[in-house]
Amino acid sequence: MTQWRVRDLQATDLDGVLRLWQQYERDVTPVYSLNEVLASARVDTAVVATVGDQVVGVAVARAAHDQAWIVFLAVDDDWRQQGISRGMLAALEQRLAPEGIQRMSILVPDGEEHVAALSKAGYADQRHLRYFEREIPVRQDEILRLRELGGRLLPHDRWGKIGGMQREKDLLENRLVLPLAQPERAEEFGVVPPRSIVLFGPPGTGKTTFAKAIASRLEWPFVEVFPSRLASSPLGLAGELRETFEKIDDLDHAVVFIDEVEEIAVKRGGEPPSPMQGVTNELLKVIPAFRERPGRLLICATNFIRALDPAFLRHGRFDYVVPIGLPDADARLAIWRAFVPQLAGELDFAALVAASDGFSPADIEFAARSASQTAFERAVAGGDDAGPTLDDYLAAISQTRTTVSAEVAAEFAEDIRTLARI
């Protein structure tokens, strides 16, 4: 599949914008004139979606106080239903957030085909007006704090882009997302929204992907805490950890993610005591204080759950301990489709899914890239531009060393039995 990308509009893109305007005007009566759109494209915030050198989409927005108005949103007729509208809307939000924008709005003419994309991107239809509006989830005064923490708002559609893994998605949706997104209704049923969870499983199984998808689904800022970076602080690892969580406390909402948490939550004990014991103690103090504030979720991920201090996993610190295993058949199919180029033509994806049983997402990506490289080298050497073949992919699969061995898979199954809490 040919990949499109979103970037800022450039002066050389105006011919492409004009072409999209002509398509748009043919189908509906525009709210804004062409002159208004072109003037706004030059001085306000504008992005385009491109495939190679071709402009296949454009979105233009004008900021006014704490609100932004989308004055033009169009996608080439041949590139609709590819998620381009949502991608451009997300890009506009990211570029306008530092200006303190609290709402994104758009007036839509009758017959507009972007209504579904707007709804999926979180815009609410204001009845009788065909007026769509979206609340921006981060206040202006939070932007600087979020930048200081290295946090960001993730695109709205990450959750939907996770293919397969339906059991894990349903579990996280029901246990985490729904109570956190609807706390008042949850309270009516006696449900306490979770404050912290652990994701565990073999390397490369998508724990980070799930953490980011949860933040995307909630539309909360995503802040990743890197133990290796904390260690370089003059405050020391424990002091920097404490100060980082104090800064996070200034945010109304946040999904805080600590990957490879075993680095700072190792089992305590031994003589002499490990230098990391003080860090583990500090983290055990930080978590209860973090849990007292609503509107936030701590997600810790580990490849080696057996290495964690037993006190770290007890009830009262983490609401759920969730296993994330290797991708199922549906997930493998979605991953393969993401990495197989359109040049490859029709492939027997069922054969790829079956042959890659036991592969992690990273393993599938490696095999797909290897097959593409083989086809590329063949094309350069002999002029064969047919693209990767099924044999190329099957050969790449056979030569890929899987991340998760049979022994690791067996240990993971045992950890699910003894440590999972869902």
Image (cartoon, rainbow, N blue to C red):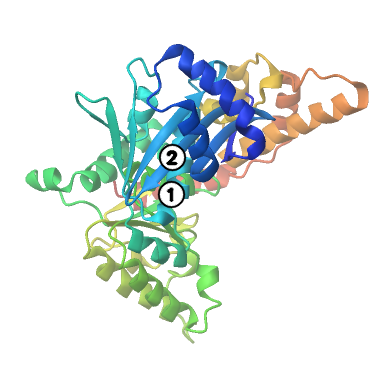
Quadrant placement of the N terminus: top right
Q: List the single residue furthest toward the front.
A: 35
Q: Amino acid at mark 2?
A: Ala
Q: Residue at x 20, y 26 (%)?
A: 127
For marks 1 and 2, give the one nearer the viewer: 2
Q: Residue at x 60, y 44 (%)?
A: 405
Residue 16 at x, y percent in the picture = 61, 26
Whole-Å distance between the Cαs marked 1 and 2?
9 Å
Please report contact status of discs 1 and 2: CB closer than 8 Å, yes or no.
Answer: yes
Residue 230 at x, y percent in the picture = 50, 73
The residue carrying pointer 2 sits among few (fewer than 14), some (14 to 19) or many (20 or more) residues within 10 Å by Cα, namely many
Reading the image, the residue beneath label 1 is 96
Q: List the single residue furthest toward the left.
A: 188
Q: Amino acid at mark 1?
A: Leu
Q: Label for residue 270?
A: none
Q: Residue at x 52, y 79 (%)?
A: 233
The residue carrying pointer 1 sits among few (fewer than 14), some (14 to 19) or many (20 or more) residues within 10 Å by Cα, namely many
Residues 164 and 309: in front is: 164
Q: Is residue 123 visible?
A: yes
Image quarter of residue 387: top right
Residue 129 at x, y percent in the picture = 23, 25
Residue 322 at x, y percent in the picture = 36, 48
Q: List the single residue furthest toward the right.
A: 381
Residues 47 and 153: in front is: 47
Residues 232 and 116: in front is: 116
Reading the image, the residue beneath label 2 is 61
Q: Say what secondary structure mark 2 lies in.
A: strand
Q: Is residue 189 above or below residue 107?
A: below
Which mark is first along the chain, 2 or 1? Answer: 2
Q: Is residue 110 left or right of residue 382?
A: left
Image quarter of residue 126: top left
Q: Residue at x 49, y 82 (%)?
A: 236
